[in-house]
Amino acid sequence: MRNSGKWLDYESQSCELVTRLSRGSRVSHNIKVKGKLSGGNRQIDICVRSQSAEDISKVYECKDHARPIGTPTIDALYGNLRETGAKSGAVISNSSFSGPAKNLAKASNIDLYHLINTDNDNIRVKIALRVVIQVAFLKSFKLSFMSSDIDAKLISDSDLIYIRMKEGDISSRDIVKFLWNETDSLSYRPGIYIYSPTNIKNGVLLTNGTKNIVAKNIKIQYEVATQNYFAEMGVEKANGLLNPQDESFISASELLTEKFDPVEFIRNNKPTNKTIEEIRPHIVIGLVAEM
């Protein structure tokens, strides 16, 4: 036999939460409504009406069971919907829902919820946020340019090209590294791009260490790729309703997560092969890997 005090406490907490989420409506707890079809009284755990009308907009059934909720609960609530004329219904449960119960609820205009309250140890359902850390990195780059010098073909490898300056030769890799790490000149989105310096008018003296040429119309073609890391972020404080069908969360108060260091996480974990669409994260954190 279940603990009636614990069961009533679960109902009361659910009603309090629904009231907070249903501003502008009248919310009643544990009432009887005369059935429109049977004429008999129907017990309603939580009843939501508009402030200006007696019509019932939504009815809730609360279940504090250890076992999964099956189709009989959905059937009973659907009967209450027809009897009360409510537009929709919902089950708030402290345990999981069976697959058939989820299917029947979806076909019956019934929402499924779990009460989340981290301040109450009797609430068994906990939540964690799915996090994707998307790290952008410079996959490759190459230089292209025009030159009238006959020896231009001798400078063909991007990694071996230097820009000759008074202070000394600067490698093309260091230039791209500076653009990537220190400026916002290059895109961090996945794709292939071309960057053209706009402040070069008379050409640049390029060298491979032995041959020098004057280059014009310098362009940097670069490719950006990403790696995804999947993590679960724990929640220290939350109060709301979790929908197990689409895993959405309706929060009635401030949600406080556990401390999470994305940089430390990627140092100690390998990237996932799953896409963002497959993971369906609650949070996406974008990072840029230094070149």
Image (cartoon, rainbow, N blue to C red):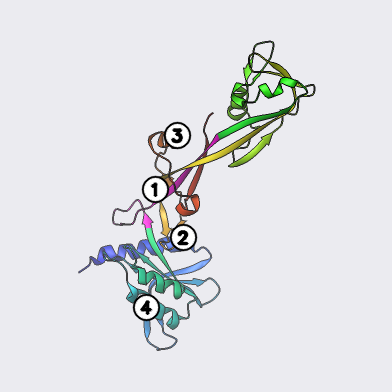
Residue 63 quadrant = bottom left
Q: Where is residue 179 in the image (x, y as percent from the top left)?
A: 63, 28
Extreme-left residue of the structure = 1
Q: Are marks 3 and 2 in contact (CB under 8 Å)?
A: no
Q: Are marks 1 and 2 in contact (CB under 8 Å)?
A: no
Q: Position of residue 260 (x, y in %)?
A: 41, 39
Circle 4: residue type: Asp
Q: Which residue was labeled with disc 3?
A: 263
Residue 237, label in figure: 1
Q: Are marks 2 and 4 in contact (CB under 8 Å)?
A: no
Left/right placement of residue 205 relative to residue 86 reads right
| Residue found at x 63% / y 21% | 161
Task: Please name which of the two marks, 1 or 4, marks the residue nearer to the observer.
Answer: 4
Q: Which residue was labeled with disc 4?
A: 75
Q: Which of marks 3 and 4 is nearer the N terminus?
A: 4
Circle 2: residue type: Arg
Question: Is residue 21 shown above or below 139?
Answer: below
Of residues 245 and 58, which is closer to you in this image? 245
Left/right placement of residue 268 relative to residue 26 reads left
Circle 3: residue type: Val
Task: Please name which of the two marks, 1 or 2, marks the residue nearer to the observer.
Answer: 1
| Residue found at x 28% / y 66% | 65
Task: Please name which of the two marks, 3 or 1, marks the residue nearer to the observer.
Answer: 3
Quadrant containing the N terminus is bottom left
Q: Which of marks 1 and 2 is nearer the N terminus?
A: 2
